[in-house]
Image (spheres, rainbow, N blue to C red):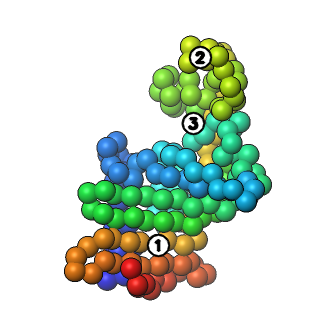
């Protein structure tokens, strides 16, 4: 049963890569630069099931990148409201790279997200004050490697909760009280 749960998680992450409306495509990323957690929604861009690695894209000047430079430990939160399933993933940021070839593969509309003259979060006069650079971008690929996965499914008569931890090269799972 535990292996089936972990396999089900992986199948959903893989499915989220090709199904744009999948509930796991957009997930919450929690970082901490100081003692205050910072939470935001990001897009799952890639998932490697063998290595349990999750990839997102970001503007290199964003607060999340600054936070990750100081603290590589994060938590990812996936939630499916129809299946009442929550998956929390503790992970470590293992790679932050600016990738010109990957940037060039992005649709033109998406490329604009990484070419604003001012860094994300900078105060501006109005929404029409956003100015874009030509020939320069701040596109960054970020990869997180899972170290722990906690699964919770709200279900009657008994909820199902399991915790998986990476021990050496194997994932060991145990049920927990929901």
Which residue does the image show at 64% across and 36% down from the upper left? 59
- Give how far apart the Cα atoms at labels 2 and 3 are: 31 Å
Tell me residue 84's x, y (percent): 30, 63
Dot 2 and dot 1 residues touching (CB under 8 Å)? no
Comes first in the chain, label 3 or label 1: 3
SS state under label 1: strand
- The answer to whether residue 158 of the structure is visible from this angle is yes
Tell me residue 3's x, y (percent): 37, 79
Dot 2 and dot 3 residues touching (CB under 8 Å)? no
Which residue does the image show at 30% across and 71% down from the upper left? 154
SS state under label 3: helix
- Residue mark closest to the camera, 2 vs 3: 2
- Give how far apart the Cα atoms at labels 2 and 1 are: 41 Å
Label of residue 126 in the image: 2
Tell me residue 166's x, y (percent): 56, 77
Tell me residue 54's x, y (percent): 52, 56
- Give how far apart the Cα atoms at labels 3 and 1 are: 31 Å
Q: Which residue is mark 3?
A: 102
Q: Would you place residue 127 above or below residue 97 in this image? A: above
């Amino acid at each position: 049963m535990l292996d089936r749960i972990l396999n089900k998680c992986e199948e959903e992450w893989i499915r989220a890569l090709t199904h744009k409306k999948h509930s796991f495509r957009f997930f919450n990323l929690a970082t901490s630069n100081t003692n205050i957690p910072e939470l935001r929604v990001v897009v799952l861009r890639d998932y490697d099931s063998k290595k349990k690695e999750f990839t997102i894209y970001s503007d290199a000047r964003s607060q999340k990148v600054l936070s990750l430079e100081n603290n590589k430990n994060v938590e990812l939160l996936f939630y499916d409201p129809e299946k009442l399933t929550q998956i929390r993933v503790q992970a470590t940021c293992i790679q932050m790279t600016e990738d010109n070839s990957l940037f060039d593969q992005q649709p033109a509309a998406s490329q604009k997200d990484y070419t604003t003259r001012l860094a994300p979060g900078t105060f501006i006069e109005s929404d029409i004050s956003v100015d874009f650079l030509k020939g320069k971008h701040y596109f960054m690929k970020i990869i997180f490697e899972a170290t722990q996965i906690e699964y919770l499914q709200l279900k009657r008569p008994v909820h199902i909760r399991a915790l998986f931890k990476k021990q050496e090269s194997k994932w060991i799972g145990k049920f927990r009280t929901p």
